[in-house]
Amino acid sequence: MSNIAIIPARGGSQRIPRKNIKLFNGEPMIAHSIRVALASGVFDRVIVSTDDEEIADVARASGAEVPFMRPAHLADAHTGTAAVIQHALQSVAGSLSQPFDYACCIYATAPLLQARFLRQGFETLHAAPEKSYAFSVCSFGFPVQRALLVDGDGCVNAMYPEYRSVRSQDLPAAYQDAGQFYWGRSDAWLRGDTVFSELSLPVILPRHLVQDIDSPEDWLRAEYLYAALKAGGELE
């Protein structure tokens, strides 16, 4: 059995320029994901898929491999993650005597990633041969059925009016993609099996260990969370 970690990291981030190698807690952001992947002990190889030479250099200095450069047509803002993983698996296939059994996509901007959850994800998927994926999720902090909308006139409306009178404690919990990692069987990635479907199992993370990073506000919140978690001894 063999496992590969694939960390997508294109150079053209728009909302936070160069965010994959922007310093976070004194080191390039991507270095956190690489370090945790290596420390997890579950990967035979940890590689970075990038179109950017500077990111490639940082990745190698952090301990990852960059065995190929990603082509431009897979490095724009509209390219999906699955296509990047498929390309990575196909690119390394020629150097292998046999393909990897499992491939885990790890996002480069996941500073709260922990090795124990990577291991849990692998164990979860390996124990369920009928499933294609296992990925990180966390619960929403408040029932999504009670979400509100602000219309063009600045007025508030219920997104789901049928739940206006239902107590929040009587509504089922909903979960969101935690944006950290996605374990998959290599053949499932290559077939293009849908990740957000009944083919997947959840790896449920505590909400305070999750922070997606798409805006400067997200980045600042991640820095606060990281400092608090580190002070509290919750980061490995």
Image (cartoon, grey):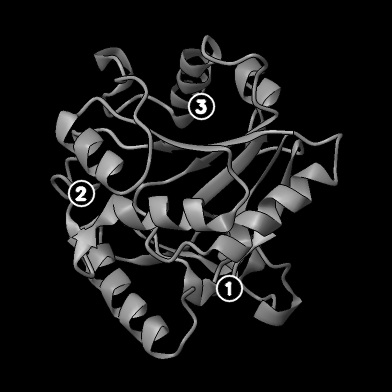
Secondary element at tag 2: loop
Give the left or right position of residue 128, taking residue 146 as reference. right
Residue on which disc 2 sits: 21
- The crowding category of the residue bearing disc 1, from other C-alpha atoms within 10 Å (few below 14, some 14 to 19, many at least 20), is few
Residue depicted at 34% across the width and 52% down the height: 109
Q: Quadrant of residue 132?
A: top right
> Does any portion of residue 161 appear in the rendered image?
no
Task: Residue 222: give x, y in percent of width and height.
Answer: 31, 70
Secondary element at tag 3: helix
Mark 3 and mark 1: Cα distance apart in space: 26 Å
Of residue 112 and residue 156, the one placed in the foreground of this image is: 112
Residue on which disc 3 sits: 82
Examine the rendered structure and indicate whether residue 139 appears above or below residue 188. Answer: below
Give the left or right position of residue 105, taking residue 58 as reference. right
Of residue 81 and residue 96, the one placed in the foreground of this image is: 96
Name the front one of labels 2 and 1. 2
Secondary element at tag 1: loop
Task: Residue 13: give x, y in percent of width and height.
Answer: 20, 40
Residue depicted at 33% across the width and 25% down the height: 78
Give the number of the disc on residue 206.
Answer: 1
